C-alpha cells in the first residue's frame, strides 16, 4: 500500500509545483503588464490665435456744474447735442448711441449751493473701422466744448469665441502630444492614448500688450486668444 501511494504523492507534488510556477509567472507577467499600462506622462499644450474684435462699446461720461439746476441741465443738454452730432457726422445711425445714466448732486461752496448734472451715453457698434475712426477724432468733442470725464474710453470685445474653441482645443491637444512624444523619445517609450485631459480657461488679451480705456486712452480691437490644456498620455 505504501509503495503504490508514494508514486502518486510524487506526481501530485510535481503537478502542484508546476502549477505554482506557472501561476507565479502569469501573476508576475500580469503585474508587469499592469505596470506598463499605468505608465503615463502629463504635459501641457498651448494654442494661440490672433483675432479682431467684432464689437465696440464707448461709454462717454460728461457733466456740468452751475448755481442752479436748470443751468447745469442746459449745459449737459448742449453737450449731448454736440456728441450726437459728432457721431452722426461719422456715419453712425442714431440708434447706435443710447443714454445709459444720469445723476444729479448738490453741494455748497462757501455756503453757495451748486448743482452737478452727470450724464452717460454709450455707443455700441459692430463697425470696428468706424469706431476706430471715432477714437482718432475724439478730440473734436473737446473743440465742441465737451469735456469727457476719466473712464470715457472705447472698449473692444471679441464675441465669437465659441466659433473658434473646437479648433483651438484641437491645436492645443496636438501641441501637447508633440511634447509627450519628445518626452517618450527621450525615455525610450511611445505615446499611447489620452488617459485624461483638462481644458484650461480661454483668455482674450490685447495682441500687442496691455491697453486700457480712459480719457485719451483706448483699448485695441486686435486681440490674442490663448488656451492651455493639461493632458495625461499613456506610455507604452
Image (cartoon, rainbow, N blue to C red):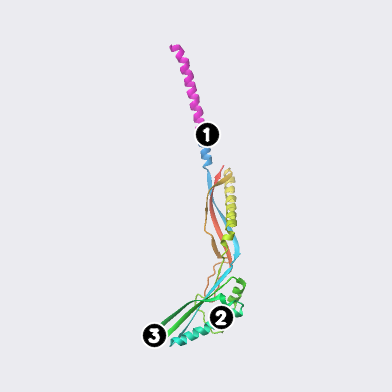
Q: Earlier in the sequence, mark 2 or mark 1?
A: 1
Query: Are there few (<14), some (14-19), or many (20+) residues within 10 Å of tag 2?
Result: some
The Cα–Cα distance between marks 2 and 1, rounded to whole angstroms, is 81 Å
Q: Where residue 197 appears, x then y in whole percent?
A: 53, 51
Residue holding disc 3: 108
Are discs 1 and 3 less than 8 Å apart at CB? Answer: no
Q: Is residue 154 above or below residue 2?
A: below
Are discs 2 and 1 less than 8 Å apart at CB? Answer: no
Q: Earlier in the sequence, mark 1 or mark 3?
A: 1
Q: Earlier in the sequence, mark 3 or mark 2?
A: 2
In the drawing, what numbered circle is on residue 84? 2
Q: Where residue 56 appears, x then y in whole percent?
A: 56, 71
Please tell me which residue is depicted at 58% across the width and 50% down the height of the picture.
177
Q: Is residue 200 left or right of residue 130?
A: left
The Cα–Cα distance between marks 3 and 2, rounded to whole angstroms, is 32 Å
Residue holding disc 1: 29
Give 94 or 142, whichever is nearer the viewer.
Answer: 94
Q: Is residue 198 above or below residue 126?
A: above
Magenta residue span: 1-30
Amino acid at each position: 500500500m505504501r509503495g503504490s501511494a508514494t508514486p502518486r504523492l510524487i506526481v501530485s507534488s510535481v503537478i502542484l509545483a508546476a502549477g505554482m510556477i506557472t501561476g507565479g509567472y502569469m501573476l508576475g507577467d500580469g503585474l508587469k503588464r499592469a505596470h506598463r499600462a499605468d505608465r503615463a506622462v502629463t504635459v501641457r499644450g498651448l494654442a494661440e490665435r490672433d483675432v479682431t474684435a467684432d464689437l465696440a462699446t464707448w461709454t462717454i461720461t460728461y457733466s456740468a456744474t452751475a448755481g442752479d439746476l436748470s443751468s447745469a441741465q442746459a449745459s449737459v443738454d448742449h453737450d449731448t447735442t454736440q456728441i450726437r452730432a459728432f457721431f452722426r457726422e461719422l456715419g453712425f445711425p442714431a440708434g447706435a448711441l443710447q443714454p445709459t445714466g444720469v445723476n444729479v448732486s448738490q453741494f455748497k461752496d462757501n455756503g453757495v449751493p451748486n448743482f452737478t448734472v452727470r450724464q452717460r451715453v454709450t455707443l455700441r457698434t459692430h463697425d470696428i473701422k468706424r469706431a476706430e475712426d471715432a477714437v482718432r477724432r475724439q478730440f473734436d468733442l473737446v473743440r465742441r466744448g465737451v469735456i469727457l470725464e476719466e473712464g470715457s474710453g472705447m472698449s473692444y470685445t471679441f464675441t465669437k469665441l465659441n466659433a473658434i474653441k473646437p479648433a483651438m482645443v484641437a491645436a492645443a491637444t496636438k501641441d501637447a502630444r508633440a511634447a509627450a512624444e519628445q518626452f517618450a523619445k527621450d525615455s525610450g517609450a511611445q505615446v499611447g492614448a489620452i488617459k485624461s485631459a483638462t481644458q484650461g480657461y480661454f483668455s482674450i488679451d490685447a495682441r500687442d500688450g496691455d491697453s486700457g480705456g480712459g480719457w485719451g486712452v483706448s483699448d485695441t480691437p486686435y486681440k490674442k486668444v490663448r488656451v492651455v490644456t493639461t493632458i495625461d498620455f499613456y506610455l507604452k
